[in-house]
Amino acid sequence: MRYIIIGAGAVGGAIGGRLAGAGHEVVLVARGAQYEALRAHGLRLVTPDGTHTYRLPTVDGPAGLGELRADDVLVLAVKTQDSEAALAAWGPVPVAGGGTAAERLPLLCAQNGVEGPRLALRRFRRVYGVCVWLPAAYEEPGIVSAPGAPLTGILFLGRHPHGTDDTVRRIAADLEKTAAIEAPVVPDVARWQYAKLLTNLGNAIRALSGPADSEESERLRRRVNTEGESVLAAAGIPYASAEEARSRRGDKITLHQLPGTEPGGGSTWQSLSRGTGTIETDYLNGEIALLGRLHGVPTPLNELLQRLANTFARERRPAGSLPSAELVRLADEAVALVRKAPAEGGDTSNST
């Protein structure tokens, strides 16, 4: 199989690099400065076992490849806010022997959140969810750092919305041949994706107030997670427990300080640091806000983080520039407004 990595950033670059290192055929898809750097110098993957450079075919869209092959696997690794454009571009591409990519090819959604597979299923027949446990960073064009060891990452794979098949098992086998990625195939991949969603709710806190964990920001993170858990319970959505996740992860992914890299604050932090102008918070904290409105559960903390993160991205404010104490004060005010609203006969759905 040939793997086409649509979005060769942090996660996409790490997956593509590890697959290429194991001898698999890989094509990278990127835009702008990343596309230019990959074309000129190849992909530089910095890991605890060394720095690896992969000179791989790189395109900036489907036109660079022409007709796709029947054995191609599309790996969607763009941020969720960029998914619709990518799906619209790749879905109609013809495949050798007839039909289109949307009709014939498997599509893996290697993304945070839970919206990507739902968007994909509107266009593609064969959609696979991926729960991504793969710490990686892309802050400089052409360079991706993946500090995890002994494994680079764990990717839970399954059909969306549920089930497994021979295709996903073959993909998992290819990933595990890298010796750096564990790829369990599960029939309930969404359960793992919702568990990962809960852990990602704190991304905005670190992006707004910095990657160094203070006691007050850790307390806020727990409050935000509790709000998310309440919403999933009200919606009747199952998710893997923190204990189950810790048991599956064990000590397989330990983070190491890599030469020439700085400790980061996660994918949301990286988006703010690069000044992209967009951010994925609408599909993380915003997913909790959406479910809260659908099921009548106030979500003032997640709504606040969603609004602040979008403002920082839109105005290109520096990552980590909001003091933790100020963020906590704003969070307390948001919660107080929701608690006060019912007494005054107000509508709590948009209190923040």
Image (spheres, rainbow, N blue to C red):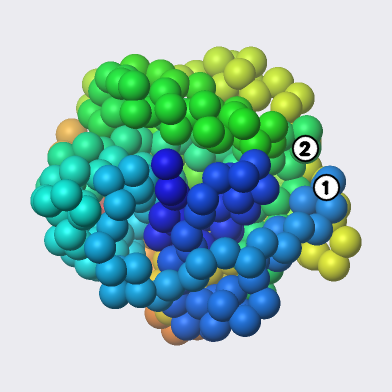
What's the amino acid at mark 2? Ala
Give the residue at the far front of this rendering. Answer: 97
Picture layout, residue 21 above or below residue 64: above
- Give left or right: position of 136 versus 301: right
Name the residue nearer the viewer: 188 or 59.
59
Q: Are marks 1 and 2 in contact (CB under 8 Å)?
A: yes
Residue at x 44%, y 66% (from the top left corner): 29
Label 1 Cα neighbours within 10 Å, binned few <14 / some 14-19 / many ≥20: some
What's the amino acid at mark 1? Pro
Task: Classify mark 2: helix, strand or loop.
Answer: strand
Task: Classify mark 1: helix, strand or loop.
Answer: loop
Residue 203 visible to the viewer: no
Residue at x 59%, y 29% (from the top left corner): 176
Distance from Cα at disc 1 to Cα at disc 2? 7 Å
Picture layout, residue 108 above or below residue 166: below
Please report whichever mark, 1 or 2, sits nearer to the chain's N-terminal start: 1
The spot of residue 41 in percent (x, y) is 67, 77
Give the residue at the far right of this rendering. Answer: 259
In the rendered structure, find residue 149 and report the number of the disc placed on it.
Answer: 2
Residue at x 51%, y 39% (from the top left corner): 132
Quarter of the image where the C terminus is located: bottom left
Which residue position is annotated with label 1? 48
Name the residue nearer the viewer: 351 or 61.
61
Residue at x 55%, y 35% (from the top left corner): 175
The spot of residue 152 in percent (x, y) is 68, 40
